[in-house]
Image: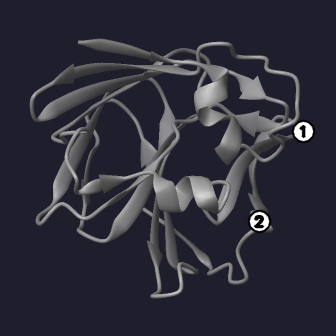
Amino acid sequence: MVIIKKYKDIKAVLIDPRAKPIIKQPYSLIVEKDQVIFVITAGVNGVEYNKTEGYLSNYPGVQVYQCLYGQGVLLMQRNDEQGEAKEFKVVTLNPGRQIGIPVGWAMCLVNIGKTFLVVVGNVNLQSSDIDSKPIIEKGGLAYFVVEKKGEIGFEQNPNYLLHPQIATE
């Protein structure tokens, strides 16, 4: 099954949800039972690089994602009991790169390239172990990935009280 996500689907997790939509169809999902392929369109919405909505994984194991095409980053965040960011990681994505997402971490894919970003993951999006609600309630993860004078930058999400140091992989 193919699912096309519209601007309205990610609006709540953007740095400026009132900004005029630039990318009308931010990403698509090709879904099989326990596997999904994310196809994220290149470009920016305002100053923010295009991204997926993101979700918190309570899957009782490691979810593995592999970049098939394009250039991007995988944002990973672990929250404390109050829903505040405890750890924040940025993993660079290039074709062939594999990343494991442990239980209890939130994730979001961001396209920082000039073409599609295509990533496959062993995840069942219909599972009760996948939850976008905590991400939507906070208006995204603790940091937004933005374009600053042609470079990649990070802006703090003001809906979080804590902004941990950004770790990179």
- Could you say which is closer to the camera, residue 114 or residue 136? 136
Residue 38: where, in percent of width, then height? 36, 26
User: Which residue does the image show at 48% across and 55% down from the upper left?
Assistant: 133
Quadrant housing residue 110 = top right
Residue 69 appears in the picture as rendered? no
The crowd level at tag 1 (other Cα within 10 Å; few <14, some 14-19, many 20+) is few
Q: Is residue 167 visible?
A: yes
Gap in angstroms between the C-alphas marked 2 and 1: 18 Å
Residue annotated with mark 1: 149
Residue 156 numbered mark, or none:
2
Figure check: 128 above or below 47: below
Q: Horizontal placement of 79 versus 148: left or right?
A: left
What's the amino acid at mark 2? Answer: Gln
Residue at the spot x=66%, y=46% of the render?
Answer: 13
* Residue shown at the point (23%, 12%) measured from the top left: 1
Q: Nearer the viewer, residue 98 or 131?
A: 131
What secondary structure is found at the residue carrying circle 2? strand
Q: Residue drawn 9% across and 29% down?
A: 33
